Image (spheres, rainbow, N blue to C red):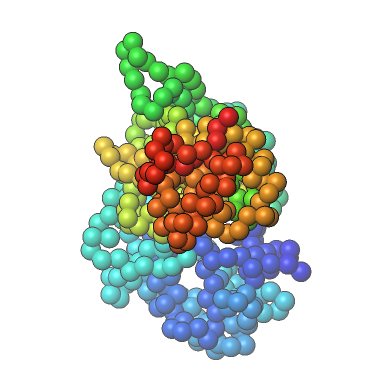
Amino acid sequence: MSTLFVSTVNTKITEGYLRNQRENQYFERKGLGEKDIKPTKVAEELIGMLNADGGVLVFGVSDAGIIQDLASELTEDQLDKYRSLCFDFIHPACNIELEEVLVNGKLIFLYHVESDFERLFARKDNEQVYLRMQDTNRKLDRDGVKKLEYDKAIRKFEEELVADFELEDLDHSLLEEYKEKLNYKGDALDLLCKRYLAKKKDETFLLKHSAVLLFSKDPEKYIPSASLRYIRYEGKEALSGTDHNVIKDERFENNIPSLIDELKAFLRASFRDYYFLDMEEGKFKKVPEYPEEAWLEGIVNAMCHRSYNSQGSAIYIKHFDDRLEISNSGPLPAQVTIQNIKTERYARNPRVARVLEDMGYVRQLNEGVSRIYESMEKSMLSEPEYKEENGNVYLTLRNKISEHSKTIDDKVMKMIETNWRDYNDTQRKVFNYLFVKHTGTVKDLSSYTGINQNTIRAYLNGFIDNGILIRNSNKQRDKNALYCFKKD
């Protein structure tokens, strides 16, 4: 039952999708009996989608996924008000298709919303402007409206037709994969038209820049800024002249889905490993210098939010000994700032973002930045750093390779793992502190564990006797003596 297709407009929508799909940037449920579920409220939600990335609003399905029946709950006059709300409450005229469908005999409304990259939409009666951000609808103030108008001007590039595009340059295998993801049975070029990635004129298909970026074998042929460049430096700074320290310089040119696949394989092989101490299991676990979820989300976000109309400006991945820098052209979009970047989202290239989500390259684009923060924290790495400078956005991820490479000897790690169950909670915390911080005084460790210094000193002396730690001081009584793991 959950795989029953209910929409002819969007074949991705099944009964299971209606019931279980999590609300996000592109999907909203509105059920009968909810607070303020008037036609004006639905209109405001639709305005938010029009001004953002489009999507589907389902009227007649509760937040809990219960399918209701509009026909039995509303009068015909009431239903007509929901049918006409786009004309009554939204201006200018918008591209919203209302689909009335029956699910197990129950009537629901599907509002299929297509965003417009040139016009700004508002309520007809009071001129209020809304914008959908993640799974919420925001009413914009005057400054917010100005920022939205600026970003819509940049978005136009995605919508422009590529007059000289040759259809043999399409990656047809990728298009077939896209068809399968959307359960679409018709022609692939017709699908591109249905998803507003192309137009059909006089039996000729004309592709938009967004389609070229997503499905061309060689987007760089038509869009000079479509490539990505990886540079590996030896050291922690970029040097020039006789000190030039670039040891690898790779350029990647392909459609965005293929770029993602190529970069995943390339970067997995490029990154080194380091250890972290799993406090629950008592194991020193080997992990890559950067968690894949962090750098992959960073790269995908750069592809979705960069200004492709800035010709000749590629996305850069700069790999130093201690950090990874990902940069893309264009300022932060719309309502997004460095301060709210973890919670706000607005895709500069929504057609691109929508297709990548449809194809499963990311779970939810609106959660991408949050996952970068979470994955770095889980790997015990520094918090990601964002900055906006010279019209570009930069993401920096810092590793612990240089810190961990000689922190602890293999024999010492094995000894700690073997005896982990014999150590008490304080002793385990001592190991964790020294592994992360590399050195520490008795006072440092006492403060960290909350245990008195005499007890800490006794534990440290025992670890020295067992060949796990060493004490770096020539003085018999030295309160500032540093303790660390034995390295050989």
Occupied quadrant, residue 105 = bottom right
Give the side of residue 124 with respect to residue 35, left or right. left
Instruction: Report if residue 373 is visible in the image.
Output: yes
Compared to 239, does 102 lie above or below?
below
Report x, y in % for residue 236: 39, 28
Looking at the picture, tell me which residue is in the foreground, 137 or 41: 137
The residue furthest top is: 242
Decide if residue 479 is on the left or right side of residue 290: left
How many numbered marks appear?
0
Residue visible at 39% across and 38% down in the picture: 475
Q: Is residue 420 left or right of residue 464?
A: right
312 or 465, which lies in front? Answer: 465
233 to 176, vertically: above or below: above
- Residue 182 vertical position relative to residue 486 in the rendered view, above or below: below
- Considering the image in quadrants, where does the N terminus appear? bottom right
Q: Going 32% across and 39% down the picture, which residue do you hit?
A: 392
Examine the rendering and report whether any part of residue 352 can be seen.
no
Q: Specify whether 396 is left or right of 424.
A: left
* Residue 314 in the image, given as x and y percentages of width and height: 41, 30
Q: Position of residue 12 (x, y in %)?
A: 64, 58
Q: Residue furthest front?
A: 476
Can you name the residue that lies furthest to the left here? 142
Name the residue nearer the viewer: 24 or 462: 462
Q: Residue at x 28, y 50 (%)?
A: 150
Question: Horizontal and vertical percent for residue 376?
Answer: 49, 48
Query: Residue at image x 47%, y 32%?
Result: 402
Image quarter (top left, top right, bottom left or bottom right) of the C terminus: top right
